[in-house]
Amino acid sequence: MNKMHLSMTNKKNVAKRYKNQFFRLFALLLSLATFSCNDDEIDNNGNQIEEGKDLYAIFYRVNTPDGRLHYTTLVNDLMTAEVDPSKAIETAGNARFFAPESEGYFTIGDPADYSLTRYDITEDNEIWEGQKFSMANEGVTDLQNRNIFLSETKAYYIDYTQGQIIVWNPEEMVITKSFDLPEQLRDGYQGYWTAMPFDEFQIVGNRLYIPVGWLNWDNETYLDKTGLAIVDIENDAMISYSEDDRCPMAVMPAIMENGDAYYGTSYYLPFATPSREKEDCGCILKVEAGADGFDQDYDPNYMDQIDGYRVGISLGKSPKENHGYVRVLDTDKLAWSPELDGRDYYGLSWFTYEINLPEQTVVGKTDLPYAGSYVGSPYFIDGQNYGSIQNEDGNSTIINYAPDGSYTEGITLPGSLMGIQKVR
C-alpha cells in the first residue's frame, strides 16, 4: 500500500540516502513504525499511484470563503487519473510551486513565512518533507511564481518586493547570495507596483531577460512603457536595462524554439482605468535571442487584423511552432469601459486567437472555450503540450494539445490549475 508521508524532521539530501540502500531501508521501516497512526501521514491511495511509472506533480488552487488553499498531489497520468484534496499536501494563502523536470523533488513556497520547503519523492512514491529556508531576512514580503532552476545546485528567485535576485542552492536548501536589480524592478518604483512574467523566462546563453511594467492599484493608473533588464547568470550581475514606449506592460512571454521571445500586454492592464478609456488595446514586443533590447523593427500592433474587436491582451505560446495565443475581449459579452471594475475582466469573456508571431499575422479564432484574461504558455512535458480550460464553477480540466491546436480533455480539478511538472 503506497503512502505519502510528511516527516517530522528534516531529511537532508535524499539523493545521498539513495546511495546507501541500508540506510534508506532503515529510514523507511522506522517511519512506518513511528508514524503509521500519526495525523501527519497522508494516504495517497485515492490517487492510484503506481510504482515504476512516470510521475507528475500537480499544483492547484481552491478558493474558499476563508481564503485560498493550494494543493500538491502526485499522479501517474495527466489524462485519466483522479485527484482528491484530502490526499494532497495543503498550503494556505498564495503558496507557490517550483520543480525542476524529472529530478525527483519539488519545492513549495509558504507565504506565511516566505519559506521554500523541499519535498523529495522516493522510489516507492513516498513524499518526504526535507529542508527549508526562509527569505524573510532578505526582505521578501510577498511570494511570486518567479523561480528559475539553473543547475542542480543553483536557482534564482526573482523578488520584486526588494528588486533583487536571491541565489539559492536546491541541493543544500540554502541561500548563497543576492544581488540588486535596477530600481525600476523594485515594488514602489515611482509609486507603482511592478509587473513581471510568471514561471517562464527567456534565457539565451548567459543572458536572462526580465521585462517589467508598472501599475498603481490605488489610483488605477499605469506607466505607458515597458522596461527590460538583462542579467548575466554566470556572474550574477546586471548587464543592461532599457525601455520601450511603444507598448505598455508587455510582460507576458511566448518563447520560441530558436530563443526569440515575444511579450504581450499584461492581463493586469484592465485594472488601469485609462487603458479602458482608449478604443484600442493590445500589443506585442519582440526580443531576439541574445539581443541587447527590444526589436525596434518589429511592429507591436496586431488588433487591426481582427474584424469587430479592438481589445487584445496577454500572450502565451501555442502548441504550433512560432505561434502564440492572445486573448481577445468579446465586447458583446462585456464592454470595454472605464465605468466597469477592473476585476470584471478576469471573467470568462475572452476569445482565444492564434497569431504567427515572427510574421505578426493573426491566424484566427481557436476552438477553445471562453476564458479569463490570463493565457499562459502550455506546459511542455515529454514532447506534449498541456494546458487547462475552466468552467463557470471555477473548476479546471487539464487538456493535451495536438500540434494543430485541437485538444483532448484529461483530469478535472476542483479549482484552478497553477502548475504541472514531471518529477520522475
Image (spheres, rainbow, N blue to C red):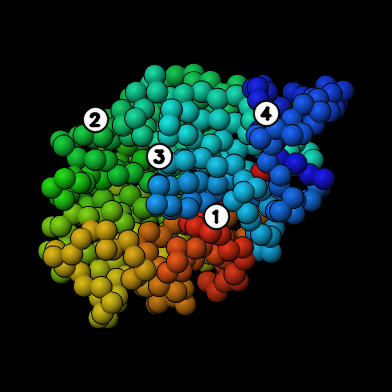
Q: Which residue is mark 1?
A: 379
Bin the neighbour count of mark 4 within 10 Å (Cα to Cα): few under 14, some 14-19, many 20 and up: some
Report how far apart the C-alphas of labels 2 and 1 lie in the structure: 32 Å
Q: Give the x, y percent position of residue 141.
A: 34, 30
Element at badge 1? strand
Q: Give the x, y percent position of residue 383.
A: 64, 58
Report how far apart the C-alphas of labels 4 and 1 lie in the structure: 30 Å
Q: Which residue is mark 3?
A: 144
Element at badge 2? helix
Q: Give the x, y percent position of residue 86.
A: 62, 49
Q: Is residue 281 visible?
A: yes
Q: Which residue is mark 2?
A: 183
Question: Which mark is first along the chain, 1 or 3?
Answer: 3
Report how far apart the C-alphas of labels 3 and 2 lie in the structure: 18 Å
Bin the neighbour count of mark 3 within 10 Å (Cα to Cα): few under 14, some 14-19, many 20 and up: many
Bin the neighbour count of mark 2 within 10 Å (Cα to Cα): few under 14, some 14-19, many 20 and up: some
Question: Which mark is first along the chain, 4 or 2?
Answer: 4
Amino acid carrying label 1: it is: Tyr
Quadrant where the C terminus lies?
top right
Q: Which residue is mark 4?
A: 7
